[in-house]
């Protein structure tokens, strides 16, 4: 469709004889901008004539291009405005195209209106290359506006009022086929996103879009993997078994359960997608437990591994109990000294192992890479109260000792004061007494 050729000369038409045409892509006229244009019109007049078409049925003229100038002329008090009268024989499609191009060339449309205007050009039958040529823009520019135009009205309104950036709108446009998901992204509290993301919901729309993309990519990987496994004759569970599900036993690589399963020649294996990776499960846990007992009873190496594993579990249980006991019994005793020590120790731990702050951020609900999680942890630490700071310090110590499997010497006196002992430490009467006091904790100090 070619743009309509203008016929006629510039004539002055009484402002009251003009009325807006139905082709105007602009929906909102900014009052402040109209006042500025009215001031310019008072000083220099209307420099670019309006384009109008006769409306014989009502004895008026319909504005094709220049409605904003017409409104500003009313504010400026002009009785007549300069107009170019176009032929009444021009089709409505050509008039609409002309009105859209005029507004887009003036580059003062709001982002949502701009996207809608480009979409209207597409609906008139123009292809991408033709729209780019008419507008003097790149095809990428046009493609971006067409993508934004697919957003629901609620998102376009936020784009127009400035609460949503164009880059964020482009990110949301990738979910144009799921308007409910877009609405969930725009919710201030992120309530509906929490279940999709499995907990923490980022603050900004851009971060939410990235988090959803990661979830969708993991889901795609899981579906592709499951389809391939089933095609190969393997049994794949639709849902990952929960920790307390007694119907299945996890067969982690290198674990005692995995070795027992392999050495016993058991074939009861099913697969599940667990934490973004495939994991084997045994669907006959009773048989597996019997195999574990048989191997432990006759294999000295397996007995040694089992004993070491039990010692590790005991250490971890001791650390967990220590942390719980301190949180339950601490009433601010020696809090000033503890706070000073906590700040020094947190700094030392973060220098020793940069993973610890990331782990703490994860416990505090942060999602994403380790850098973002560490940033969340640092923010929490910077604004923490004295009690909260010491609690976070114990969490970091627990993470560090679980990684090293060694209780640090500074923690040993606290274990004694709380009624606990290192299971690998010396056995004496005092230790036996402390072990017997585990059921009755006394506040330190």
Image (cartoon, helix red, strand yellow):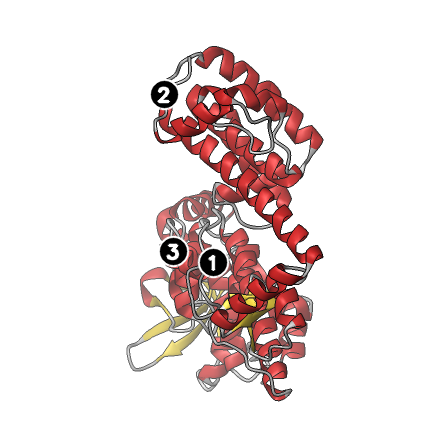
The residue furthest left is 58
Is 163 situated left or right of 264 in this image? left
Query: Few, some or many C-alpha atoms within 10 Å of disc 3 (few <14, some 14-19, many ≥20)?
Result: some
| Residue highlighted by disc 1 | 197
Judging depth in this view, the residue of 58 and 248 nearest the camera is: 248
| Marks 3 and 1, how far apart at CA | 49 Å
Label 1 residue SS: helix
If you read the primary sequence from the N terminus, does the residue marked by circle 2 or circle 1 appear first?
1
| Label number found at residue 158 | none
The x, y position of residue 439, in whole percent, is: 35, 31
The x, y position of residue 159, in whole percent, is: 46, 56
Give above or below for 163 relative to 240: above
Give above or below for 324 relative to 190: above
| Marks 2 and 3, how far apart at CA | 80 Å
Give above or below for 440 relative to 94: above
Is 215 situated left or right of 70 in this image? right
Q: Quadrant of the N terminus?
A: bottom right
The nearer-to-camera label among 2 and 3 is: 2
Q: Using the rendered image of the protein, determine whether residue 91 is visible from the camera's viewpoint.
A: yes
If you read the primary sequence from the N terminus, does the residue marked by circle 2 or circle 3 appear first?
3
| Residue highlighted by disc 3 | 71
Instruction: For the residues labelled 2 and 3, say whether their Cβ atoms are less than 8 Å apart.
Output: no
At 37% from the left edge and 49% from the top edge, which residue is drawn? 189
Give above or below for 225 relative to 303: below
| Label number found at residue 442 | 2
At 40% from the left edge and 29% from the top edge, which residue is drawn? 436
């Amino acid at each position: 469709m070619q743009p309509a050729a203008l016929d006629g000369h510039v004539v002055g038409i009484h402002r009251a004889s003009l009325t807006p045409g139905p082709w105007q892509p602009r929906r909102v006229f900014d009052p402040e901008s109209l006042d500025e244009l009215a001031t310019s019109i008072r000083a220099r007049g209307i420099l670019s004539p309006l384009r109008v078409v006769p409306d014989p049925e009502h004895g008026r003229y319909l504005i094709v291009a220049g409605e904003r100038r017409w409104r500003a002329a009313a504010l400026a008090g002009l009785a007549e405005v300069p107009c170019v009268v176009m032929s009444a024989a021009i089709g409505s499609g050509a008039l609409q195209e002309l009105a859209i191009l005029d507004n887009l060339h003036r580059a003062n449309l709001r982002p949502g209106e701009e996207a809608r205007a480009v979409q209207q050009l597409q609906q008139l039958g123009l292809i991408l290359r033709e729209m780019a040529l008419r507008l003097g823009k790149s095809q990428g520019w046009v493609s971006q506006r067409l993508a934004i135009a697919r957003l629901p009205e609620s998102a376009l309104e936020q784009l127009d009022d400035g609460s949503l950036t164009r880059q964020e709108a482009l990110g949301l446009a990738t979910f144009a086929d799921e308007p409910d998901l877009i609405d969930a992204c725009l919710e201030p509290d992120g309530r509906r996103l929490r279940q999709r993301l499995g907990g923490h919901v980022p603050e900004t729309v851009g971060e939410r879009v990235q988090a959803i993309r990661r979830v969708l990519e993991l889901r795609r990987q899981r579906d592709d993997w499951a389809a391939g496994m089933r095609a190969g004759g393997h049994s794949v569970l639709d849902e990952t078994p929960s920790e307390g599900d007694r119907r299945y036993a996890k067969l982690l690589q290198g674990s005692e359960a995995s070795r027992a399963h392999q050495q016993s020649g058991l074939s009861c294996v099913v697969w599940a997608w667990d934490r973004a990776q495939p994991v084997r499960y045994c669907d006959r846990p009773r048989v597996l437990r019997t195999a574990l007992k048989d191997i432990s009873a006759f294999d000295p190496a397996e007995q040694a591994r089992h004993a070491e594993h039990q010692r590790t579990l005991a250490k971890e249980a001791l650390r967990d109990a220590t942390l719980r006991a301190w949180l339950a019994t601490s009433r601010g005793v020696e809090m000033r000294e503890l706070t000073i020590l906590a700040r020094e120790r947190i700094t030392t731990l973060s220098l020793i192992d940069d993973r610890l702050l990331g782990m703490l951020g994860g416990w505090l609900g942060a999602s994403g890479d380790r850098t973002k999680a560490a940033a969340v942890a640092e923010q929490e630490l910077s604004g923490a109260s004295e009690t909260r700071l010491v609690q976070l310090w114990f969490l970091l110590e627990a993470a560090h000792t679980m990684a090293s499997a060694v209780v640090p010497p500074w923690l040993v006196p606290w274990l004694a004061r709380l009624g606990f002992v290192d299971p690998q430490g010396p056995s004496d009467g005092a230790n036996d007494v402390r072990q017997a006091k585990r059921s009755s904790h006394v506040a330190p100090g």
